[in-house]
Image: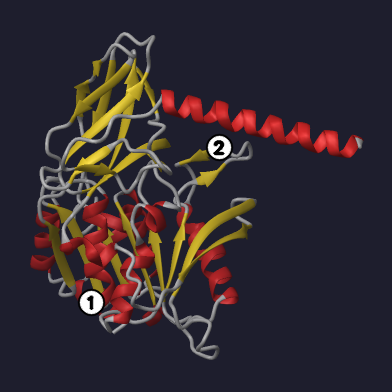
Amino acid sequence: MKKAIIIIALFLICNLALAQFAGVMRGQKEEPLPEGFKPASTNTFISQYPAVNAATRQAMFRVVAPAAQIVQVDLCGKKYNMTKDEKGVWTCVSDPQIVGFHYYAILIDSVAVMDRGSEAYFGSNWESAGIEIPEGPEGDYYRFNKNIPHGQIRSIDYWSEINGKERHINVYVPADYEKETKKKYPVLYLVHGWGEDENGWSIQGHTANIMDGLIAAGKAVPMIIVMPSGDIKTNSDVRTASGDISQIYINDLIPFIDKTFRTYTDKEHRAMAGLSRGGFQTCMTVLPNLDKFAWMGTFSGFFGFRGNNTIETAYNGAFKDPEVFNKQIKLFYMSIGTEERMGAKEAADQLINHGIKNIVYFESQGTAHEWLTWRRSLYDFAPRIFK
């Protein structure tokens, strides 16, 4: 009898709670989105906002902050003032945006916070909101394709003797890795930029979708892609930009990968590339270790001839003798967004005029220092290596 009473009581409590929840949800029900707007693909589950109009490339934002005095959206270098209604709901619509992925923040009385409607993306050294302004069919190369085989992104910790700590990496293995149990694979080490982490390439960059498509189409060689952290943890577990990350890559990471996966271990089957600071780290790792790499790429990240550095002196004279360099490196890939204005074309021309013959220069049209530039760069770079 007591058990029956308890069960009935619990049933009534659950139903009351559900009724209260439904009432709250009805009270917070959002108005239908304006015509042409749809929830962004980067939103959290069931969040209508931010919303994107694919035709106009505008974004609409909504924030509930009844006590706030000023609310703004900080997006792509511009702050948009939001308008408050009688219920304390703030809204605004952005200018047309460049297609691709963009970080943004909500400013509530000048304090930057994350938008609760967005998934969290680590960028600019904090968990940021992000929004995808969709491309048309030209962006299918980084979208999931249900009609092709898919590889895996594996989350792995390894021990670094140099760092004295465990370090996290993401590793892409192609679709046939589990089936071809005796097959060996070349390895691309792919590094993120400053202010981001080892998850950037797999999440914001859509590395797996890009590589699955390229491999399925026969455009790229099946390869393992290692996406490490470009930062070093201190004893207090704080991520810093200090320390020689190249030594960790060379002495800890590469041996771990070659021991753990079925890899070719010669230089002809090893490549490295990175975006922004990761491109600089690629240069700092590859150029002093030309016996270990035959392919390299810098995406918005070649900083060789600044200050007192020249072609003769940059990176300890790696480019001083073009004939020696040409024999060591099969491809030196340099890319940039046309809106970046970072001097990559000038640097590429200098190297070519100096006698470096294996330069490939690529421009992402209409994009700046952002993920669409780097997705396009990977899509163009990956088919060129290990062939």
Q: Position of residue 94 (x, y in %)?
A: 17, 31
Q: Residues within 10 Å of mark 1 (few under 14, many from 20)?
A: some
Relative to 108, is 92 above or below?
below
Residue displayed at 58% across by 61% down? 156
Residue displayed at 39% across by 80% down? 269
| Viewer-nearest residue: 68 or 250 | 68
Q: Quadrant of the N terminus?
A: top right
Observer able to see residue 320: no
| Mark 1 residue element | helix
Question: Which residue is denoted by mark 1 in the rendering?
Answer: 326
Q: Position of residue 319 (x, y in %)?
A: 23, 65
Q: Residues within 10 Å of mark 2 (few under 14, many from 20)?
A: few
Observer able to see residue 69: yes
Q: Quadrant of the C terminus?
A: bottom left
Q: Is residue 328 left or right of residue 18?
A: left
Residue that lies at the very extreme toward the right in this rendered image = 1
Q: Position of residue 189 (x, y in %)?
A: 41, 66
Q: Amino acid at mark 2?
A: Val
Question: Which residue is denoted by mark 2 in the rendering?
Answer: 238
